[in-house]
Amino acid sequence: MGVLSLRIDDELEQRFRTVIFERRGMRRGNLRASLEEAILDWVENRQILAANIALLKQLRKESDDRGQPAPVSETARGLVGKLQDLLRARRERPDRPPAASVPAA
């Protein structure tokens, strides 16, 4: 298990602790569990953002000179599938608010 030693803004720390107390109560391990959840959310959000950017770049690359969308390629379908997998994994995580859905290509 990793160990982090860091300093954060006092107000941010207090806000974080208040939310933890309101959501989980005052029990041993709640701060650690909430911090792990926050880090996991941050990482997942970056993965979803990267998948969205890759999909948009692919779709832009596939559009014709007049800006009309071209038929969706297998590459774009694969990127949509990857994005759907990331969102599905996020939804299936316990104690997780639902994520936005992605329409099928």
Image (cartoon, rainbow, N blue to C red):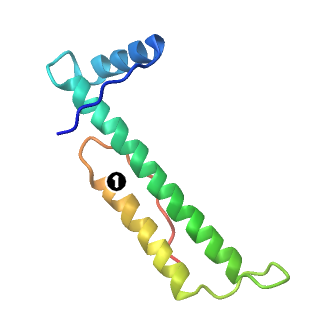
In this view, the residue farthest toward the right is 66
Q: Answer with left or right where residue 52 lies relative to residue 40.
A: right
In the figure, 52 relative to 2: above or below?
below
Quadrant for the N terminus in the image: top left
**Residue 33 on image: x %, y %:** 23, 32
At horizontal 42% and vertical 16% (from top left) the residue drawn is 15
To which residue does mark 1 refer? 90
Instruction: Examine the image and state in which quarter residue 92 appears.
Output: bottom left
In this view, the residue farthest toward the left is 28
At horizontal 62% and vertical 76% (from top left) the residue drawn is 58
| Residue at disc 1, secondary structure | helix
In the figure, 20 relative to 77: above or below?
above
**Residue 71 on image: x %, y %:** 64, 88
Instruction: Examine the image and state in which quarter residue 17 appears.
Output: top left
Q: Answer with left or right where residue 39 lies relative to residue 78.
A: left
**In front here: 36 or 20?**
36
**In front here: 35 or 81?**
35
In the figure, 46 relative to 3: above or below?
below
* Residue kind at label 1, given as amino acid type: Arg
Is residue 18 shown to the viewer in this render? yes
Instruction: Examine the image and state in which quarter residue 28 appears.
Output: top left
**Residue 70 on image: x %, y %:** 70, 86
